[in-house]
Amino acid sequence: MSTISREEVARLAGLARIDLTESELTRLAGELDVIVDSVAKVSEIATEDVAATSHPLPLTNVFRADVPEEPLPVADALAGAPSAEGGRFAVPQILEED
Amino acid sequence: MSTTTPPLVDYDEAISRFDPVIGIEVHVELGTATKMFDGASTEFGAEPNTQVTPVSLGLPGALPALNGKAVESAIKIGLALNCEIAELCRFARKNYFYPDVPKNFQTSQYDEPIAFDGWIDIELDDGEVVRVEIERAHMEEDAGKNTHVGGATGRIHGAEYSLVDYNRAGIPLVEIVTRPITGVGDRAPEVARAYVQTLRDIFRALDVSEARMERGNVRADVNVSLRATPEAPLGTRTETKNVNSFRSVERAVRHEISRQAGVLDAGRTVTQETRHWHEDTGVTTAGRVKSDAEDYRYFPEPDLVPVAPSREWVEEIRATLPEMPVARRRRLQTEWGYADAEMRDVVNAGAIELIEATVAAGAAPAAARKWWMGELARTAKTEGVELADLPVTPEQIGQLQQLVDAGRVNDKLARQVLAGVLAGEGSPEEVVTARGLEVVSDDGALLAAVDEALAAQPDVVEKIRGGNQGPVGAIIGAVMKATRGQADAGRVREIVLERVQQG
């Protein structure tokens, strides 16, 4: 059962800003198909009374107290920035699409 | 896309031929001490990037830890909006690329909001009540702040590069989404404004946010669509983003109605898109074409466990909810006996709390209103400040009114006492003492003044004796003048009549 088309892979790659060659698109469409089919097997055994799982640990309500902690020193915060100005990260011009 | 813009249609004309439908998304920044998923401070106005941790910056390996107080605030908001509170809900990643989102996704909620299916009654200026249905309220985090350099200041197009401050990234937000608001016709802009105002009042009453519009604590996105008749299916909507003042919310809705009517009249279709609001010119301009939800590739956040508020916890929170602003206004209006118009003026002047505190300090409601909406309102207007920022407290106004009630100062003297208080000369009592403003009702002092006045106008005495009460006023006036307005007028009248009889 084929569920992932080559066009869909191309669209997702565009959304994720991943540059894929024509041959990679073809290969990934096939691989993703297999992955999706495999994962879909889960729904064969997941019945109405089985709650969806989003975390491996059966925990809920893990909260942190609202107490401030030491922030990163600015120099450390900016250490990985290719460019900075006045304590701010300098980034390329925002894309025209927005 | 056509290159020419169809002309705007006059608002009344547009409304006469189209039925507007609006929807509003409000983001409120919660007033927690720390961010949603890390312990960085949320204090406003710090130097750039001084309130960040590896989590705020989305550094590799950094893991989020959920702020329990933010969850509690979100539940409070949900309950205040008459929502159901989810028994179990999750966070989700909303994936998109923009420099102010350092993780390349925003941690939000998708198909499992913490609160849903609510409603809130809002009151328009003329007292009409409109019920707005709430679809959902969900938790998420704020983005950083971009400053665009080069090109027109602050504008995206033509910018050469951008500077990013992540202090705001990760501040807890609750986003509240209405269902489509229909059937309000020409009042749509006013309904939109009143709704955002009502939410702001609720956030403050709940003490979940400072809710300061000018700081961007509360931000509204307004959706507008038009249809030919109320029976027709919903038209294509636009979403005008980041409208950040009450007045702008009203103006933006009004403008979009006129603009869309022009587009439809020209035989075109409205494009589903986000639009930018321009405060200076009062118009919206096209932004990006709206993404489909699936483009965000939402999926459950694997680094956080679900939130499952127990029913006991929810009821505990419900029990702490304060009276909601609209109910409170109605109660106070009844207690104070104000007419509708009087109450509306008080609300619009932001004087409810001031009057409430003044009444608590011992003034009658009518007197409290007279001070705040009269003398003090005039002073505030002259000085160009808000009532609450005047250098006088409700307690001092209460004390002043008690001096009036006790007959120790008359209205004229009271205004002089107030002037002294506003000038920083101390409490009303201190000003009375320092300026010697107390009403003179001491008979000795008044007798002397009355005798002097009578002696100066002997013919008046004859007239009064002859049964003509008219000239008594002239004598009282002379006494008031001699005592620089400080005489107790009632007592002076009594003394004058006694003197004349004795004479």
Image (cartoon, grey):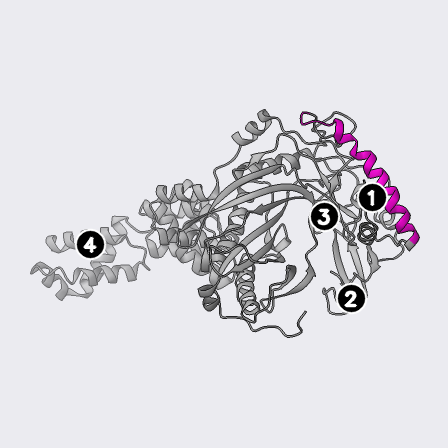
Q: Residue B309 placed where, x, y %?
A: 63, 29
Task: Give the chain of mark 1.
Answer: A
The residue pinned by badge 1 equals A72
Query: Is residue A98 rendered to the left or right of residue B322?
Result: right
Q: Secondary structure at mark 3?
A: helix
Q: Counting residues from the N terminus, which is met first, the one under dot 3 or under dot 4?
A: 3
Of circles 4 and 1, which is in front? Answer: 1
The alpha-carbon separation of the residues under discs 1 and 3 comes to: 35 Å
Residue B171 in which image quadrant: top right
Q: Residue B493 placed where, x, y %?
A: 20, 54
Q: Split into 4 quadrants, where in the image is the N terminus of chain B?
A: bottom right
- Region of the chain picked out in magenta, as a range: A23-49
> What type of secondary structure mainly makes up the magenta span?
helix
Q: Residue B120 placed where, x, y %?
A: 49, 43
Identify which amino acid the numbered label 3 is placed on: Glu
Q: Secondary structure at mark 1?
A: loop
The residue pinned by badge 4 equals B493
Q: Residue B315 placed where, x, y %?
A: 55, 28
Question: Can you say whether A45 is above or below B256 in the image?
Answer: above
Q: Nearer the viewer, residue B499 or B16?
A: B16
Q: Are marks 1 and 3 on the same chain?
A: no
Q: Residues within 10 Å of mark 2 (few under 14, many from 20)?
A: many
Of circles 1 and 2, which is in front? Answer: 2
